[in-house]
Image (cartoon, coloured by chain):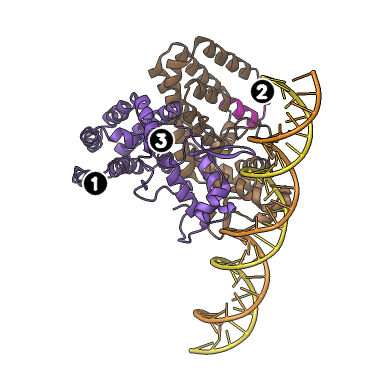
Chain colours: A purple, B brown, C yellow, D orange
Amino acid sequence: MRRGQRATVNLADRAYEQLKAMAITYQFRPLERLAEADLVKRLKVSRTPIREALNRLVTEGFLTFTPNRGFQCRPLDAKEIFDLYEVRRTLEASAANLAAERATDAELDELADFLKRSRAAPDDASVVDLVSLDEEFHERIARLSRNAELLRILQNINARIRFCRWIDMENGRRAATQSEHAQVLDALRARDATRCVAVMNSHIARRLDQIVDVIREGYARIYMGSYSQVRPARARAPRVPAEP
Amino acid sequence: MRRGQRATVNLADRAYEQLKAMAITYQFRPLERLAEADLVKRLKVSRTPIREALNRLVTEGFLTFTPNRGFQCRPLDAKEIFDLYEVRRTLEASAANLAAERATDAELDELADFLKRSRAAPDDASVVDLVSLDEEFHERIARLSRNAELLRILQNINARIRFCRWIDMENGRRAATQSEHAQVLDALRARDATRCVAVMNSHIARRLDQIVDVIREGYARIYMGSYSQVRPARARAPRVPAEP
DNA sequence: CGCTGTCGTATTGTATACAGGGATGTATTG
DNA sequence: CAATACATCCCTGTATACAATACGACAGCG
């Protein structure tokens, strides 16, 4: 993933992936202090790669840090999630706008194909899988915007709000999601940038006003351990820019 | 800076600030390999804090990394700068939009005041200072959007394109910048979100089509060493989110 | 009874040793 | 002469030892 090309797996990267997965699923309790010695025992590597991984996760917003006190799990904070959704809405609208200009017809066909395959997912698919499909649809559009930085930022935001989207997806969001995605595709095919922006905006805005409830539910999940055993569906997100 | 409250200065943070300043000013040549042993000698700290700093800078997009080969200076890449400007334009427009809704009258008065003081800067002010004032104006608006994530992302983007903005500012951009800023302020005071977005968009878009030229000039500067001795005007950008 | 200061322990911050992989240069062979 | 294989050296990746700091407990004092 990270670090461009080579397949070498170094311990720091592995620790990063593991810790990130744990942070996303809130296997650490909000504000819980992460003692490095514990993680050494759990991940079976020395402090050096663990600290490297933890530092990256701080930079990416998955953990917090206090000097001489170490790393903590980020709080599940309604304001933060709200801000992230707001930024995401802006960026996704922009991505759709750009994609309407820049995507080839063939690429839009592929997108349509993906949407079709998504609809074929079974009714009892897990929320984790459904959110994963949802994310991929949006990520594909971001890719069609041809803007690597936009894509990178969105991937980070998506990972940070993923936990909330699992919860959100549980209340029969699937049908609405699918029809809204279809509308986005229509607008893209029509090359109607204005409509793209409008549809994407309202698609995401609909979720914005429910965050407080989702957060409340989220706390319940964390302390009841509902998603703790979950593993993210796929490895993700190169770390390096453009890619640098 | 980083790490919320405590004033303790650890070596890793200091190394981070120094290396970041060097990366921004391209004191490293594009694609130059940064040998850790050299940095140890130059910064007079051991490899551990240096590696921590370098890793952060990779995550933030100031450096690149190749496994088993270490860290390199990012290339001065037109596509990357273009992408960053494009994202910036979207986010700044959004920030202005939100600020028009959320800023108090008193806050807009302060902004007006800042603009007035900026105009008082001497004619022979350095481009570094002028860009710093420019950035601060935009950063203030981002703050008025009340969206901590938006602010954070913009700060990162600003640092990454700062080098190009120095060059851009050299061709008598000052007057145009000031009048455009005044227009943004007007639109904010009128609480006219639509006009805010429009004005901000064109303010930034004007720069977009000159990037290729700026990059070309940038290479000349790097290899002639023009900005090498420059120090960024002020310490910046908390690392931690919302604060998460 | 509560507050404050000091000591001990646990945890983080930094340096450094050591191991392994990559790149380069040389020698040998076709 | 060119190409390839090998050896060597340098640099990165990881572990670990040591230093510094914070936290908690306990005791002394007001």
Chain identifier of the residue bearing label 3 in the image? A
Q: Mark 3: which secondary structure?
A: helix
Q: Nearer the viewer, residue A238 or A10?
A: A10
Residue assigned mark 1: A114
Residue A226 in sight here: yes
Across and down, in percent, residue B12 comes to: 65, 44
Res B110 → quadrant: top right
Across and down, in percent, residue A158 comes to: 39, 38
Q: Is disc 1 in contact with disc 2, using a CB cutoff of under 8 Å?
A: no
Name the side, left or right, on which B84 lies relative to A221: right
Kind of residue at badge 1 = Phe
Across and down, in percent, residue B88 comes to: 46, 32
Q: Is disc 3 in contact with disc 1, using a CB cutoff of under 8 Å?
A: no
- The reply to whether the magenta stretch includes residue A39 is no
At 29% from the left and 42% from the top, the residue drawn is: A137
Q: Which mark is residue A223?
A: 3
Q: Mark 1 packing: few (<14 Cα in 10 Å), some, or many (20+)?
A: some
| Above or below for C25 versus A50 | below
